[in-house]
Image (spheres, helix red, strand yellow):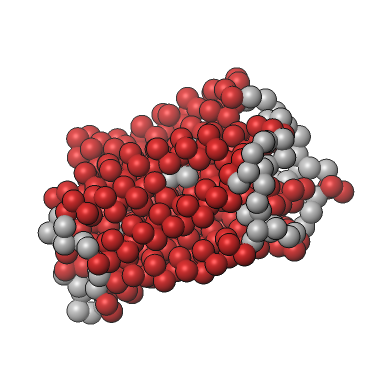
Amino acid sequence: MLSACRAEALVAVLLGLSRGAARVRAGRRDAAEIRQKDPRGRRVRDGQSVTIYAVGTALTAIPLSAATAGWRRKRLLLTAMAGFAAANTVTAVSASYALTMAARFVAGVAAGLAWALLAGYARRLAPVRLQGKAIAIVMTGIPVALSLGVPAGTFLGETLGWRVTFSLVTVLAVALIAWIAWIVPDQPGRRREGRVPMLRALTVPGVAPVLFVTLVFVLAHTILYTYIATFLDRLGMGGSTDLVLLVFGAASLVSIWFVGAHIDRRLRALTLASTLLVAVAAALLAVLADSPALVHVAVALWGLGWGGAPTLLQTAVADAGGDSADAAQAMLVTLWNAAMAGGGVAGGVLLGLLGTGSFPWSVLVLLVPVLVVVVGARTHGFPAGPLPGANGSR
């Protein structure tokens, strides 16, 4: 079971690295584009590869998950990874903007399908007492890749070029397809008579609160994370962006490890701690950002709060969803990517209207309803007490 979950975790790593590679390709021009606004209001194309990837995932995760509910799980995962590898190959060799955007959209579609599948697949491979840990292992890949992918991608991009970075992702994807085919056990899809309509999952107690928390928490995080280089530029720390991201990534790894070790017994407490840590980090960045040392402390707290959040939210929605877990996961993936795309847009609006100083304050404002919902969802969604088969308290 552990080997299969680790293989699925590497799938999540690749999904995150591909997104990070796209950020590297687009991100270097962001600050210049902000400083040199087009007076005629022309649309700036750079950076749209990140958005179109998220849009592809957000638009298709739910309908594709519903359409493929009867497929055997291993066949579906292999199909998604093959589509992902093909799309990254096209991105690596494309000289056409339109073709590149189409390839990134397809990569987003494949990533959304795989992401919606992973947590439920891992949960079915594990005994009840280890289901939370299995999801934690699988979902480790996404925060690891998103936290460390930008510094790693920046290094590879500057050393070898972004096309080589995408090519490397493709090579790794092909190797991973072979590993999945060899080591990951298969699981059947759901029989038609046993399937629950996608939207009916919203009526399951606890699912809606988790989805709300996901949407708003990810939106808050993305507003600041997307524009972190711009925010640091304003503080005179533009040359320290890679170091700041490394601190964030290292703290995220600690968070991932800690959450994975304790999630079966303390999901509620960990979710509350995650929200509060990010809020404290945002408060520090809002009022004490003049000190580089405190900026690094704040970013470390941010990483500690955010690193385990994907695992916490995936586990919470799977636990609340029960027999509707796959449908709930598909909705979570859709909302997650909608929040990522929306965070970039909202951050751009805030930047134009209020400047970079508004980013940490917006995070604080958004985290208030997140905390209220987590506190209120004590019976369903983020309940007190251990997961089935675990001992201890949340």
Say if 43 sits above or below 86 in the image: below
Rendering quarter of residue 389: top right
Q: Image check: 310 left or right of 62?
A: left
Q: Image check: 158 left or right of 225?
A: left
Rendering quarter of residue 184: top right
For the point 32% across and 74% down, which residue is it?
350
Residue pushed farthest right? 193
| Residue 92 x, y percent position in the rendering | 35, 41
| Residue 390 x, y percent position in the rendering | 68, 36
For the point 27% across and 42% down, which residue is it?
246
Say if 54 sits above or below 261 in the image: below
Pick the quarter of the image with the N terminus.
top right
For the point 46% across and 35% down, which residue is it?
257
Residue pushed farthest top? 182
Say if 17 sits above or below 127 in the image: below
State whether residue 57 appears in this view: no
**Between residues 252 and 383, which one lies in front from this camera angle?**
383
State whether residue 373 appears in this view: yes
Residue pushed farthest front? 392
| Residue 66 x, y percent position in the rendering | 71, 52
For the point 54% across and 23% down, which residue is it?
178
Rendering quarter of residue 265: top right
| Residue 67 x, y percent position in the rendering | 71, 51
